[in-house]
Image: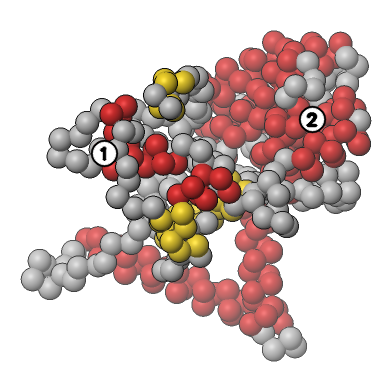
Amino acid sequence: NPFWEDFPYTNIHASVTPDVLHQIYQGVIKHILGWCTTLLTEKEFDARVRALPPAFGVRHFQNGFSVLSQISGPERKEMTKILLGCLVGKIDNNILIPIRAILDFTYLAQYKAHDADTLGYMETALKTFHRYKKYIIQVKLHPTLDIPKFHSLLHYINAIKDYGTTDNYNTETFERFHIDYAKEGYRASNKRDIFPQMTAWLSRREKISMFDNYLHFLDQDHPLSPSSSTEKPATSTITIAKWPPHPRCPIKTIQDIHSAPHFSEDLKNFLNSFLSHPTSNFRAQLFDLPFERVDVWTQFKLVIPNLQLDIGVDRLLEPDKGTVKALPRSATNPSGRFDTVVVFWGDSAQSTGTDGVFFFKATYLQSNLVV
């Protein structure tokens, strides 16, 4: 006899909100990783994970997945990022498609802002999974797929419409706060009679944050007059070291050790674009560069803009930071490391995905046009 049986207008299921951490990452993704291990074998799966080179934005699992125990939510997220790359070419596309659909749904469900289009993407991903899930049953990865965690995905879209985005009720947020503030509060105490001290410390932090927000509100409501305003220096989202680690490096050496055989050609085209009367890229290759050496930086740091929210408006958000590396081959790293970045070239670019484009590059070589 549930307590709500006498409440005729109560939909008890509406009181249970989705939980991305425990339902998707620690539930659905956990099942999928287990199925992939069954399809590939543990040894093959680990070998493919180890074979992936270190890259920007993802964790490199040097020993594979099987050695991990008590896998946390953040670890599961990192495993999810490289999952498809480990499966392509090894398992049947009819199995790969529903797995990809679940991953699409997972990332879409974590958007910090939604509209009809993004909710439509979620619905499409879910329909794709249900259209292809029969193949998962056919290979006997699961007898029915009647799993509560998978069923919960059906309620995400309605929950987002009713209660807002999932970050409002994802338990990961509160777990993270508990971990951070419990540790920091304890460190701020004298390690004796800690609870009153931790409570006082947290209360002061809240007051400081509230006062800081109030000052920010006043600054927006009463901007400084033009005469008293101070010009703030522009801050770039990309920073590099003041001095290059490889100064005056020959262009031929760069083409060899950095695996950039077209560097000289592309550099000519780049410089040609700055001329007041640029020539064609084909003709630009007939001219010699006015220099033979350039300074080389092997990495740069950047602040990654949030595609969902305006950082300038939501100042409580901590921007994501990362380091992009282009390390040449060496004795300790024979293959080098060359990270890939995706650049938004125009305002019409979509943040939900990218489409591959095949093209042929024409190279001028020994008076012949080689494709």
Of 329 and 186, nearer the camera is 329
Q: Secondary structure at mark 1?
A: helix
Give percent across and percent down for residue 258: 55, 47
44 relative to 191 in the view: left or right = right
Q: Secondary structure at mark 2?
A: helix
Q: Is residue 38 left or right of residue 364?
A: right
Q: Quadrant of the N terminus?
A: top right
Residue at 30 percent of width and 50 percent of height: 290
Furthest-front residue in view? 366
Examine the image and state in which quarter residue 280 appears. Answer: top left
Q: Amino acid at mark 1?
A: Asn
Q: Is residue 128 above or below residue 49?
A: above
Q: Nearer the viewer, mark 2 or mark 1?
A: 1
Q: Is residue 240 visible?
A: no
Residue 246 numbered tag: none
Residue at x 75% of width, y 88% of height = 192
**Residue pointed to by mark 2:** 32
- Residue type at the position of mark 2: Ile
Q: Give the x, y percent position of residue 82.
A: 69, 37
Left or right: where 135 falls relative to 85: right
Identify whether 193 is placed above or below 271. Answer: below
Image position of 218 (left or right of 317): left
Which numbered tag is attached to residue 272? 1
Q: Residues within 10 Å of mark 2 (few under 14, many from 20)?
A: some
**Quadrant of the rendered structure where residue 154 is?**
top right
Of all residues shown, which one is farthest toward the left? Answer: 227
Which quadrant of the view contains residue 168? top right
> Gap between marks 2 and 1, in whole Å?
51 Å
The structure residue drawn at horizontal position 32% and vertical position 46%, both measured from the top left corner, is 289
Give neighbour class at mark 1: few <14, some 14-19, many 20+ (Cα, 10 Å): some
Q: What residue sits 52% from the left and 41% below the top?
A: 260
Give the x, y percent position of residue 126.
Answer: 64, 20
